[in-house]
Amino acid sequence: MKKIALAAALLTLAAASYAYNPPLGGENLHSLTSPELISGGASATGGPIFTVVPASITYNPAITALEQRVTLDLSGTMLFNTENNLPGDSSVGGGFQLGLLVPTRYGVFTGTVQGLFCDMYSLNIGNSVVLHGGASKDITEKLSVGMNVYTGFYFGCGGGSDFTVGADLGVLYLPNDIGFLKEPKFGISLLNCGKPASSYKVLGIDKKEGNSYPGILTPRVSFGAVLFKTPSISGGFSADLSFPTCQNVVADFGFGVTMAKIITVATSWQANVRELLEQSSDAVSWPSVGVNCRLSFKSEKVGNKFADWKQSEITPSLAWQNLYSGIHAVSAGAKINLGMEDKDAPVIYLWDEEMTEDESTANNGE
């Protein structure tokens, strides 16, 4: 029985690999509905400024392990087809993303739901609703691990219907500074370990009927670091390589600058080798541009019960990118971090040591 199950699994994997022919943008489904991810956060190390939103787990489940605050995230994207000169080609598409991140003593738990609806000749990704649930944990101060489970439903646009189900695995490592590279991060993830939407028919990169996307068994490696840092401004970069179905190479590059720890401006660009080989200039996208602003607000009603929640943060974001053949993505959203980050190490008293008045006041949150 085990041999039969193994043979069936290998046969399914071989068939999916042979049929690898995703549509343009088929490997970017999880980034299209989030301004943070469009502008560089779609990385296994969190992008150039270490951006963490609930949807970050779709690129590395371990990324959320160091988060200390409950995070809510809501975003949406409109897709405008400015060159819809073909019969039946849609002029407008779009989608949404909703996520929740909850840290606990046992680990960080995250859930996201994404809806994406687009029927364009040059972005024939169809309609889908995808759900991810993830758990991550810091093993040491430098090493974190994580895992997702997911399922997705693909329907409409003349392609019939199908579903995906599977798991993602990820590791995030924070080594010591490397020369002028500060706060380096190294991420490895193995994504889409499961069933792809192999029978949902769309227009593939070879301009023929395609399927099997997003790519099954997608290894991803990433490196990011801070290039410069002063009290008023800092900048960093990230670089990712992914290998969808081990039949393609996709490179992602991001660069971002944060000013006064409040405003962040970021850009990113992707080179998808199979897309460029199959469709040449039609598969070349412009670099994305994104901006967000971190604002603090009082959350006293919650703070009356939880001292650490007297002040929270909201980060509205906006991003734009000119995608394939005149398709423009305009994305907006907001992330809410409830409470304040704990940046102070705990104070431990031994035997008959006593706290000073100042330390007692600080520990009581007064």
Image (cartoon, grey):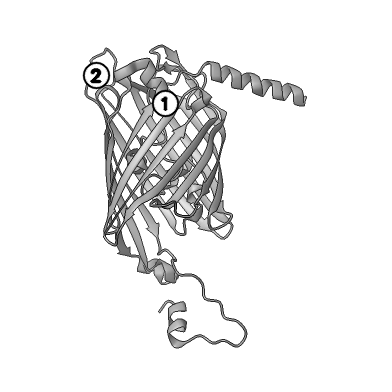
Identify the residue at horizontal 34%, vertical 38% (top origin): 38
Most distant residue in the front direction: 179
Residue identified by numbered label 2: 84
Q: Nearer the viewer, residue 193 or 195?
A: 193
Quarter-wise, where is residue 326 in the image? top left
Mark 2: amino acid: Asn
Query: Viewed as shown, does residue 267 lie left or right of 130?
Result: left
Identify the residue at horizontal 44%, vertical 24% (top origin): 155
Q: Position of residue 278 (x, y in %)?
A: 38, 15
Q: Quadrant of the C terminus?
A: bottom left
Identify the residue at horizontal 26%, vertical 60% (top origin): 232
**Element type where label 1 sits in the image:** loop
At label 2, counting other C-alpha atoms closer than 10 Å, the crowd grade (few under 14, some 14-19, many 20 or more) is some
Mark 1: amino acid: Gly
Q: Quadrant of the N terminus?
A: top right
Residue identified by numbered label 1: 26
Q: Earlier in the sequence, mark 1 or mark 2?
A: 1
Q: Nearer the viewer, residue 249 or 365?
A: 249
Visible in this render: residue 40? yes
Q: Which mark is residue 142?
A: none
| Position of 58 relative to 302 (above/below) | above
Distance between mark 1 and mark 2 Cα atoms: 19 Å
**Element type where label 2 sits in the image:** loop
Q: Position of residue 239 (x, y in %)?
A: 40, 39
